[in-house]
């Protein structure tokens, strides 16, 4: 007679801890955005965001915005809060995409105003190739992945930006070295070091 083997019940997979960051201006000011505690996911600090959005100011009104490495999603939600008409967020982490969509629901943002793509940047940019170019683009990847060049090449090659597009680039290193191969194609408009963060606004150079 064969003995029965008892099976242990499967333990439920624990969701990663959740933190919150606050939107600092506009329609959704003081509302919270949830994000998971994951490697490489670090929301842009309040004082840096204040500087960024002071730089962008009225250029956000009715803008079509792309958040290339959304993470918490706070840059995109901040843009919508300040008058952007449409946001596309790219984020490969399934759990974090779920939180971005939950925040969208909590803020009452219509699906016509926000598209969240669960994909890597390498997967997402080709899929956007046949869409209208974006007016504002946030390029703030996990620093350790060093995706700045990959993103810029993808945006240019797939014609996702136009001559007036404002590109926000955030990094942990000086942009003169980081963007060395793009000096012929990018015009710096704003640049500032804030603590350990290097932040700048760029446009394509016109011939």
Image: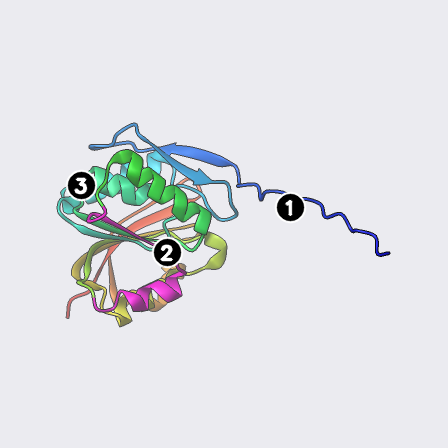
Element on which disc 3 rests: helix
Q: In this view, does 95 lie to the left or right of 205?
A: right
- Image spot of residue 125 (x, y percent): 32, 65
Residue 48: tell me if it is visible.
yes
Q: Which of label 3 and label 1 is nearer to you? A: 1
Q: How many angstroms separate mark 3 from mark 1 (CA)?
A: 51 Å
Q: Which residue is drawn at 40% across and 45% down?
A: 98
Q: In which quarter of the image is the N terminus?
A: bottom right
Q: Which label belongs to residue 57?
A: 3
Query: Quadrant location of residue 134?
Result: bottom left
Q: Which residue is drawn at 45% across and 59% down?
A: 146
Residue reaching furthest to the front: 1
Magenta stretch?
A: 111-130
Q: Is residue 91 left or right of residue 115?
A: right
* Residue identified by numbered label 2: 175
Q: Quadrant of the C terminus?
A: bottom left
3 or 1: tag closer to the N-terminus? 1
Residue reaching furthest to the right: 1
The correct choice, above or below, for 38 with respect to 88 in the image is above
The correct choice, above or below, for 16 with respect to 153 in the image is above
Q: How many angstroms separate mark 2 from mark 3 (CA)?
A: 22 Å
Q: Please state which of residues 105 and 199 is positioned toward the viewer in this rendering.
A: 105
Q: Please state which of residues 82 and 15 is positioned toward the viewer in this rendering.
A: 15
* Residue identified by numbered label 1: 10
The correct choice, above or below, for 22 with respect to 102 in the image is above
């Amino acid at each position: 007679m064969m003995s029965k083997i008892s099976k242990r019940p499967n333990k439920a997979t624990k969701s990663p801890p959740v933190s919150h960051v606050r939107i600092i201006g506009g329609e959704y000011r003081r509302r919270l955005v949830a994000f998971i505690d994951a490697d490489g996911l670090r929301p842009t600090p309040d004082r840096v965001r204040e500087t960024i959005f002071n730089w962008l100011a009225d250029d956000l009104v009715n803008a079509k915005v792309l958040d290339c490495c959304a993470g918490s999603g706070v840059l995109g939600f901040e843009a919508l809060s300040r008058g952007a008409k449409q946001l596309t967020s790219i984020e490969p982490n399934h759990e974090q995409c779920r939180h971005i969509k939950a925040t969208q629901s909590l803020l009452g943002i219509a699906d016509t105003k926000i598209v969240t793509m669960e994909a890597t940047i390498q997967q997402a940019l080709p899929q956007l190739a046949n869409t209208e170019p974006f007016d504002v683009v946030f390029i703030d990847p996990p620093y350790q992945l060093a995706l700045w060049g990959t993103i810029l090449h993808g945006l240019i090659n797939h014609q996702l930006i136009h001559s007036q597009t404002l590109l926000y680039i955030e990094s942990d290193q000086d942009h003169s070295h980081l963007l060395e191969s793009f000096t012929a194609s990018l015009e710096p408009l704003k640049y500032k070091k804030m603590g350990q963060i290097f932040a700048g606004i760029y446009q394509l150079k016109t011939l």
